[in-house]
Image: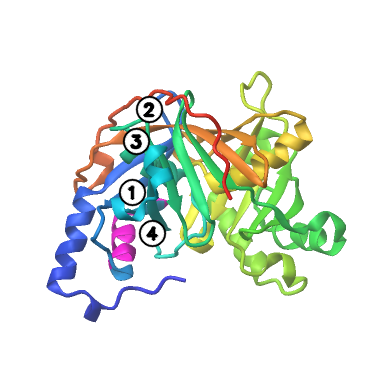
Amino acid sequence: MYRHVDSSEVTADVSAKIANLVSTASVVYAFSMSGVGGNPAGVVVNEPSTSITLTVQKAVASLLNFPETAFVERKSATDCTSSDREGNIERCAIRWFTPNGSEVDLCGHATMAAAHEILRNDSSKTLIFETRFAGEVIVRSSEEGYRMEFPEVHLEYNAQICRESRASFNCYFTKELASPCPLELLGRTSLGDLVAFGDTQEDIENLIVSEVRAALLTLESAGEPRKAFSAIRGLIVVVKTPRYGSTYDFASRFFAPHIGIDEDPCTGSAHCFLGPYMSRILGKVRVAGRQLGPGGGGLVICEPLEAGRVALYGECRRKPSKLPSSREQIPSVECTAPADAQHGRSGMT
């Protein structure tokens, strides 16, 4: 977890580098909907043969104060194989940090934001992001904006077979809410997210962020059974019956106070579980997920693939690369995602 950067680590040169990266970072809203909404991510793209220390990465993410900031290190031509060059593939390393300095295992929206910064000037490329914890992530342009291939996230712990876990969730979480919401605990994912189903979209819309935060902290410290509730990353609440007339298949919200995000506007990693799961229970090849987060939330199109992979599709919109002292003063700048590069599906080993 995060520790505050020791002032002894921040020399004048380091301080200047941090200030420069903050002022030149790009701001991209991923999973937006026709130019509105989306989840903001800071993006710092590092050219080959240069590096950014962990101390600098954490400080920049903290100062930018977006749900996540992506740090991308572009690979040099010598790091690419002949097949990469023939296929117009560029390889990059990527890491993601939250404002409190936590490094996350997987982040969908900041990956899309980083891809947008590279592909908006060359939509014919395929990007392969090499991650520390989630293998390779493939991104390319598509008719929906961008298409990203991630590993599918599975249930690590199924609360449906453990009455004790469900009872504890109802006792220590649901009853802590000032306005109780009927939620049924499904389980916990391999990323450490609890998943709970609500009855109606209105139920989850009425959840109050401060109450959810307090209830999650109460739940984690409640004692037995600890297997389901210790070391929680976040909470996904979802309904499979959205409001009548909606153009999406399910609706959700995501809360992660443990990593410094009280509520996330739109969460790609959560849809790496929700997409395949909802596809199976709804009997659809593709499903559209509407996340009801702050700032308008976002929309994620999900398509389960073979070999335990899932494709997420979405749009981006952009803000100016130079940040003033107050982000609220930045006017929105819309952009059109690159045209479909007409690539076929690419498998991964």
Q: Find disc 3 in the rendering and name its residue.
A: 119
Mark 2 or mark 1, earlier in chain? 1
Instruction: State how far apart marks 3 and 1 are (Cα).
Output: 16 Å
**Label 4: which secondary element:** loop
Mark 2 or mark 3, earlier in chain? 3
Q: Which residues are magenta?
A: 56-67
Q: Residues within 10 Å of mark 3 (few under 14, many from 20)?
A: many
**Towards the viewer: 337 or 251:** 337
Mark 3 or mark 4, earlier in chain? 4
Instruction: State how far apart marks 4 and 2 are (Cα).
Output: 27 Å
Image quarter of residue 130: bottom left
Mark 4 or mark 2, earlier in chain? 4
Residue at screen point 48% across, 29% down: 343
Give the dominant element type of the magenta stretch: helix, strand or loop: helix
Q: Residues within 10 Å of mark 1 (few under 14, many from 20)?
A: many
Q: Find disc 4 in the rendering and name its residue.
A: 99
Instruction: State how far apart marks 1 and 4 are (Cα).
Output: 11 Å
Above or below, 222 against 191 in this view is below
